[in-house]
Image (cartoon, rainbow, N blue to C red):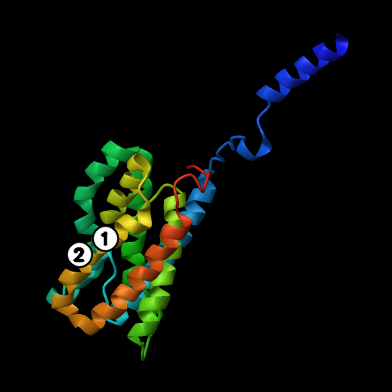
Amino acid sequence: MNTDTASGTGASEAGTRKPPDVMMIRPSRHTLPEDVFAITIGVALVSFGVFLFQQAELVVSGVAGIALALSYATGLDFSVLFFSLNLPFYALAVGGMGWRFVIKTFCAIALMSVLVRTYPALIDIAALEPAFAGLIGGIMIGLGLLALFRHGAGLGGINILVYWLQSTRGLRAGYVQLGIDAVILAGAALVIGWQGIIWSVAGAVMFNLILGVNHKPGRYVGVS
């Protein structure tokens, strides 16, 4: 009888115990210094990738791509265009993601506007192959955006929309952005020609693959 009772108790305890492989992992909250460091590094990487695209007269995706195409066509300053075109999207960010995201994103956009304008004064590129600019620039943009997304920030415009769709609908950021980018790049072909579009597309594929593979819902448990 004692054996039966012990077995019943053991079975009951075993039934309530969660297997190690399905136990919930509690998210680890990023500290403010961690957010500042990661967002700064992320913006620096994205900005340099955009700088490479700019020097090779390529276009990147999102609002930055629209700003680059307009700057090539009109001669207007990219940084001013990029900062201004992002302003209407903050309303979506406030309603969908809150003030914390808006503040981080606003700071990231402001810093990127400054860095892209500053790099030409710090770096003199005599020759730059479009293939190198597209592929390496795309990798840098992808890694930079990955850092920003994981610390609750974006770079405005399409990034805000993409981040909102992943946060509220569970859609993968990289694949959603890839579809939107296709429309932007098709329009930019009127400005830079199809040869430039080929390497711009190569860069877009690179950084969207980085996001699609590494920024899946539920894979990263850190929160900001």
Residue located 52% across and 48% down the image: 220
Furthest-top residue in view? 1
Point out residue 92 in the picture as x, y percentages from the top left corner. 24, 43
Foreground: 143 or 55?
143
156 shown above or below 53: above
- Residue that mark 1 sits on: 179
Residue located 20% across and 64% down the image: 183
What's the residue type where badge 1 is placed? Answer: Gly
What's the residue type where badge 2 is placed? Answer: Val
The alpha-carbon separation of the residues under discs 1 and 2 comes to 7 Å
Foreground: 190 or 55?
190
Number of numbered markers = 2
1 and 2 marks in contact (CB < 8 Å): yes
Crowd rating for badge 1 (residues with CA inside 10 Å; few <14, some 14–19, many 20+): few
Residue located 37% across and 52% down the image: 172
Q: Is residue 70 left or right of residue 104?
A: left
